[in-house]
Amino acid sequence: MTRRRIEIGVSRPILPPDPAAAYRLRWKRRRLLYRALRKRRQLATVADRTGRIRPGDILLFTCVRNEAARLPFFLDHHRALGVDHILVVDNGSTDGTSEMLANAPDVSVWRTGHSYRQSRFGMDWLTWLMIRHGHGHWCLTLDADELFIYPHWRTRPLQALTEWLGASEQPMMGTLMLDLYPEGPLGEVPYDVGTDPTVTLPLFDAGNYTIRRQEPMGNLWVQGGVRARRFFASEPRRAPTMQKVPLILWDRRYVYVNSTHAALPPRLNKIQGEGERITGALLHTKFLDQIVRKSAEELERREHFANASLYDNYYEALIDKPTLACSFSTAYRGWRHLEALGLISRGGWT
């Protein structure tokens, strides 16, 4: 395996804007905003505490389904970072997720039984909530299996990070999604609810990443990690996208295009600038013990990929409880280790 420092925050040449492409992207953004307006009718209120949101609060948005095991640590982690209010769409959970969230005083919950795939994998629902409640706020948009970290995250709260980003005229922050996995076969190491999942999932792939820029939106396309190595080695272009822009100073005219991998207007994707910019990581806890059961469920539901049949082999491989660890596996040791590997950057935030 070739080791490669991807250094997402390092500046690379950006082509001059194409007026015709810019026009098409403006209309694409408007169509996606209109989709969200229409899909708002699919949401039923479970607990609306958004009246408690104050100017300057940092908000977290997420769409979940049957995440009662992950959510206790997920919520506590991001509260400790400095998130003030959490807005959740529950997509038909049956494990008590909705009830647990409804009892949390800093959480607002909406419920829907409509198709996750046909709502752009939850983004239509979240876009509507961000139009209503996110305008003018720093908004963190995550999946329940993602833990947001950044340089100095244990000693500097999100408020300090967002103030520095604002002073640096950087209204967004990019991250690498870092797949964590266990030492043994999938599904064999039990996870204790409420504990740090990085203890259960101590390993990651450090050096098999590729990076290219996608036009016309100017977003980065990063691929690699354990899923590219283990499940998509014969078809690397189908491997998951590992770069996201989860933290944005939101405006009601903004919209995410493909999960949080890219946003419109295109300037939100310029996580590279003059010199080096700060970037973080999303610690991806997909491979906790529940992955085997969830893979069997998603193989039947076919809600997580646009062309779901193309990923049947992927889900079948997960159901077989493979061992993902290999001689190239690296133990996760914190953000400074990720920085040394070139996977995140402090930029000018020292």
Image (cartoon, rainbow, N blue to C red):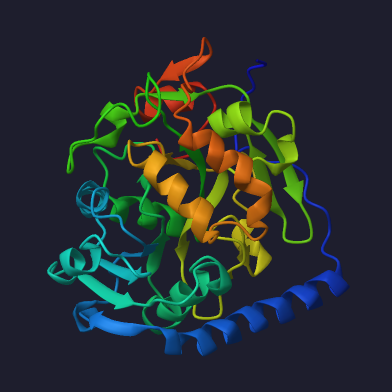
Q: Residue at x 65, y 63 (%)?
A: 267
- The residue lying at 24 percent from left, 77 percent from top is 53
Q: Residue at x 32, y 77 (%)?
A: 111
Q: Is residue 124 above or below residue 70?
A: below
Outermost residue to the top? 327
Q: Is residue 345 visible?
A: no
Where residue 237 sits, quadrant-wise, is top right
- Camera-nearest residue between 12 and 253: 253
Would residue 16 be found to the left or right of residue 52 on screen?
A: right
In front: 105, or 190?
A: 190
Image position, residue 77 (x, y; %): 24, 47
Q: How many marks?
A: 0
The image shows residue 348, relative to residue 100, as above or below, that is above
Where's the N terminus, which quadrant? Answer: top right
Q: Nearer the viewer, residue 174 or 304?
A: 304
In-image side of 179 versus 16 (left or right): left
